[in-house]
Amino acid sequence: MLIGKSIRGDELVAANMPEIILYLPVLLALIGIAYGAYVALSIFKKSEGTAKMKEISGAIREGSDAYLSRQFRTIFIFGLVLLVAVYFFLGATVAVAFLVGAFSSGLVGYIGMYLAVRSNARAAQASLTSMQDALSVPFSAGVVTGAMVSGIGLLGVSAVFLGVYFIFGQSASALSEAGKALIGFGFGANLLALFMRVGGGIYTKAADVGADLVGKVEKGIPEDDPRNPATIADNVGDNVGDCAGMGADVFESYTVTIIATMLLGMVSFGITGALFPLLVAGGAMLLGLASSITVKVKNENEYPFDAMKRGFLISTVLQAIFFYAISMLVLNDIRAFFALTLGLVATHAIIRFTEYYTSTKEKPVQDIASAAKSGAGTNLIAGLGVGMESAVVGILAVAAAILLGFYWVGLGYFGIALVGLGMLATTAMIMAMDTFGPISDNAGGIGEMSNLAAAGRKRLDRLDAVGNTTKATTKGFAISSAAIAAVALFSTYFETTGLSSIDITIPAVFVGLLIGGAVPFIFSSLTMKAVGRAANLVVEEVRRQFKDPRIMKGTKRPDYAACVDISTKAALDSLYLPAAIVVLTPIIIGFGPTLIGAPPTVGLAALGGFLAGAILVSQLMAIFMANSGGAWDNAKKYIEEGHFGGKGSDAHKAAVVGDTVGDPFKDTSGPALNPMIKILNIVSLLVAAAVVGKGLGAI
Amino acid sequence: MLIGKSIRGDELVAANMPEIILYLPVLLALIGIAYGAYVALSIFKKSEGTAKMKEISGAIREGSDAYLSRQFRTIFIFGLVLLVAVYFFLGATVAVAFLVGAFSSGLVGYIGMYLAVRSNARAAQASLTSMQDALSVPFSAGVVTGAMVSGIGLLGVSAVFLGVYFIFGQSASALSEAGKALIGFGFGANLLALFMRVGGGIYTKAADVGADLVGKVEKGIPEDDPRNPATIADNVGDNVGDCAGMGADVFESYTVTIIATMLLGMVSFGITGALFPLLVAGGAMLLGLASSITVKVKNENEYPFDAMKRGFLISTVLQAIFFYAISMLVLNDIRAFFALTLGLVATHAIIRFTEYYTSTKEKPVQDIASAAKSGAGTNLIAGLGVGMESAVVGILAVAAAILLGFYWVGLGYFGIALVGLGMLATTAMIMAMDTFGPISDNAGGIGEMSNLAAAGRKRLDRLDAVGNTTKATTKGFAISSAAIAAVALFSTYFETTGLSSIDITIPAVFVGLLIGGAVPFIFSSLTMKAVGRAANLVVEEVRRQFKDPRIMKGTKRPDYAACVDISTKAALDSLYLPAAIVVLTPIIIGFGPTLIGAPPTVGLAALGGFLAGAILVSQLMAIFMANSGGAWDNAKKYIEEGHFGGKGSDAHKAAVVGDTVGDPFKDTSGPALNPMIKILNIVSLLVAAAVVGKGLGAI
């Protein structure tokens, strides 16, 4: 319907462009991937340090591999069922695209983790020479992940689009087929991301909370103490949750935003409008990767985050200039430049406000720390209050982006999608800054367990603290970009269904809205409870092992694999229900009314209300949980810096409780809402297509 | 627009009814009020016990009076500004109705508190003879509150409606004027309820948390120990928060639901449709009051809650029969009976599911208690998970009520409003069950402080525990009925504006939705932080007083008034910003787009989106917070009953942290969303009227 309805037929062969431009996105993607591979090889050349370091890193690698391969097996069964359903209802092309999407997303997550578990010991070893060297290894590994997320994402989308385009010829129906295939690709990518993000999130926090509760709280031994049987599982968690999970999550935001922009771009600009987002993404990626070279600390004492912020600023300035050039060259429309640049501004704003709410240097975190003086209860109340407030700021930022993107830019829904594309153009640098954190964290853990020299450990501690800040800010970016991606998908939903309106005064639509808002709550409830349950199992296992006195004395090596196994199993077992809910609910809402005799438009409109409710509530809850969690974490750190009695004081104990609650908030339930909201939109698009026409032919 | 557009002119004088029927609602209301006064006098005849009991009760009474009179002064200033605005923009009739609404709501709150502070010592004294006597005093006081909430509510609405009707004559424009006046009445009632609920909520938890943190946690003295300087403030809090606040809250749900049902009823049934809700409410009230006589324990050992449930069941059965009779007699339409009875069923369902999530006898609370074994963090995670899950069930209940009320009943929006009216028909009994709780709590406190004989204290302890359960369930009722009231108001909003749709694919409407969803978050954040801040002030004052060793020895009377003063001031200072937000946001959204050149319908549609977002999120958050809080409270009680180590164990300490977080959740921020959502709707109705036509003439 979308393309069939609105495409400008005379532009099907891009009249004013040489045909080579069709291949340009693929070329750009390949350059990005090649650069990533080059950086990866340069990391692998570095030393992995002592035998002890290699051994610990090996154990983490083993645990991570074991987790990921079991996770892929879990996904395989679920994915196979969906593949059959997709093939049956939507045809072979979409099924192939679905497979490509799922494979790419899994690949990106795997590469992110592969790099991370091979960089941690090297980062620890490099920390012995200088801060620049210490920074360089984890940051370079992040650059590789950034290159792969954007490069493979761009390659996959371009390949699907061009493949269909060339197989089916250059007719309007071919473009329609391409539209379908792109949505199929997005579905595959989303499915993988959902599993990786949610499974990884449950895993990492079950291990972390379990390790801390027995190790730090009951036994009083430090974090990452090699005597703690859960310490390897904890470090594995950083890799499978923060590296593989975050990589897959941003990969899907990146690809679905490009896809939504392409679909909406076709409405206004024909095939040029479909190619434009690919060119924008490709150029911005290369500029981001090039700017990453400038990330260098000026001297041993410079705060490493400042070096990253400098590099990030350079990259966005270059991208803005590029946006102007390409908007004028390809679309000859300055409004595209406005929209894309708005995305860059929004990214900076989001990073800034997230920093405000989660940094130890600002009032909110200090207030939370101060509330810990009266106990854990008041510490928690303060953190919840701060998180809720930050959610309001976050949603106002999204609201402003939508209003300006639509009304000020004046390109309709395409303008909103371009704002999202502008935000996600920063993906390469954002991923570099994000992945850097868990690798430094792992490096610190390896340093702790292998008795690394003090100078190195001090540098790694500083990097770990920076990692907490970058993780919090990039999480804000991931949430907000997921929201904009969802809004862009929502716009394509509306175009796809051909509804004249989605009217919330119709009770069915209003009820759809209510149920849509309920989904993020049940999703969060399930993930919170899964972490609680899994953490309890880890606690029991660690307590069981500690009954052997030789472990505490350090004369017997704990059974690390047992904790890895328990976390893996618990995480994967908790995946089915949330996954089933997000796939089935839109199908039930979309088809349900038809089954009891209502016209198909009722179900489609109700599904529209459903999506709006889900977007609203998941955006609020995701920011609330991420920032409450980040703020509690740093309130604890603020006290550890020596305020309000410092480490070991009553205030510190109270702050540790806040941090424990914050762990699943910020690393499981909050981030899990990103893939959830996107997959709800993608499934709804497929439902709409199936309801409106035969198969996806309606798009 | 609403009435002018749709009224059936030929029915303006109810053709098939004698004119006396116009006065019947007033008569029913007066009977209810008279019965309430009679019960009140019978309570006052009972003994207040020893001099010590009188003294303590006197101190509580003094503190409560001081709080309420300062609160009324605060409201006076704010209300005066609004009164001038209402008069200026909407005319004298609406201004008078606004005043009557505000006065009635304040009066109901005041009477509720007046009764409560005069029944607490009498209940303590009565507990010495038998369980039936112990139960009878607080429950009778509750019956009086129930009679006043429904009687005064019905009287106020009837008087405003009939007053306008007789002054302006029986024309269509007179009915339109009556419609305006009713909304003005609702606005006045809402404004008072907002202040009473939010101010009382902050007060009660500041005092409670403050008293507990120093008394129970730091000094290890029992609850309600007379040496604790905050103990009187804590008991005052029960009265100003749970009695005055809850009374005003349900009063406004009750009145605005009647008003919305009248407005929508006029559309379908003319003046008969306007009178019908008044007759339904009046009859149901008298049946509820009559059934309250059956609430008697069978013997000394019967669980008192069972006696209440029995009485409640009798009242709803009688009401269902009455609904059938009046639906056939007045409207001659069986569908009205279906809708009203659906409301009764919904009330039972809500009470049942709230009981499931908050009772010590069910799995959720026991799971939370079990999680406390691993510490406060896991206890909190478990409680948050349970609360979120319960919010999903709650919103599904509301969704079912809307779907069935609209599609199954087949009376359009009027059907939804009738479901709400059916729910609120139970108000008299619900208020009796609710108010009973804080009075028993107070009686227990007075017993503790005055060394009441053990038999009496044991009976009061049992009643207090029952009070916790009734409070949790009636809170679920208050939240859900507020949601249905808001949906009914939302329907009238749509009818009032004359918009053909509220289409969320229009970005302005979607952004309205986002901002609407943000309001409950900022509201909750402000109230949470207010409690935290105020509790800290109380903590400091109590610590200061405890520096005098004579207080701990019991040889010097603590300065109770200081804590009352601090809580009062902190609560009232925290009121302005939330109140300003709820009044101003709808005005900004409604008029804002017009100011930058958009047609008025854009602002009205955006305001519609805003209301939908606000209803969705406030319903989710209110149930989430109320049930998390209730569940933590009872998880603590479950451990105190001897499970997982019992009182004083590590699990118990962890559960106390959950209870502290739950206090503002369940008694401040959660309930505060009830008046918030209704006032947002009422203000939007007034904005719509002002935008659509000259003043309110458009309605």
Image: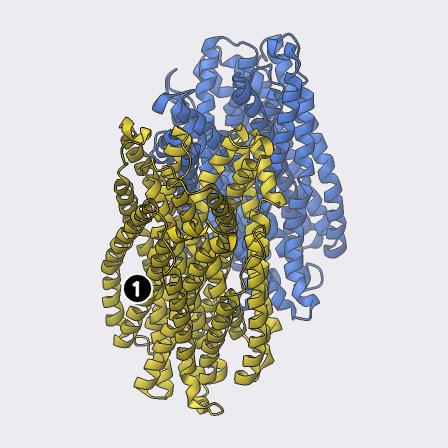
Chain colours: A blue, B yellow
Q: Is residue B260 visible?
A: yes
Q: Quadrant of residue B453?
A: top left
Residue A657, above or below B456: above
Q: Which residue is mark 1?
A: B595
Q: How many numbered marks does the figure carry?
A: 1
Q: Nearer the viewer, residue A144 or B43?
A: B43
Residue beneath the point at 23% across and 62% down: B81
Residue beneath the point at 35% across and 29% down: A361
Looking at the rendered image, the quarter that the C terminus of chain A falls into is bottom right
Q: Is residue A257 left or right of residue B516?
A: right
Residue beneath the point at 45% across and 13% down: A130
Q: Nearer the viewer, residue B71 or B483?
A: B71
Residue B228 image offset from top left, x and y in percent: 34, 36
Name the residue type under label 1: Leu
Q: Is residue B392 visible?
A: no
Residue beneath the point at 66% across and 18% down: A545
Q: Is residue A289 left or right of residue A163?
A: left
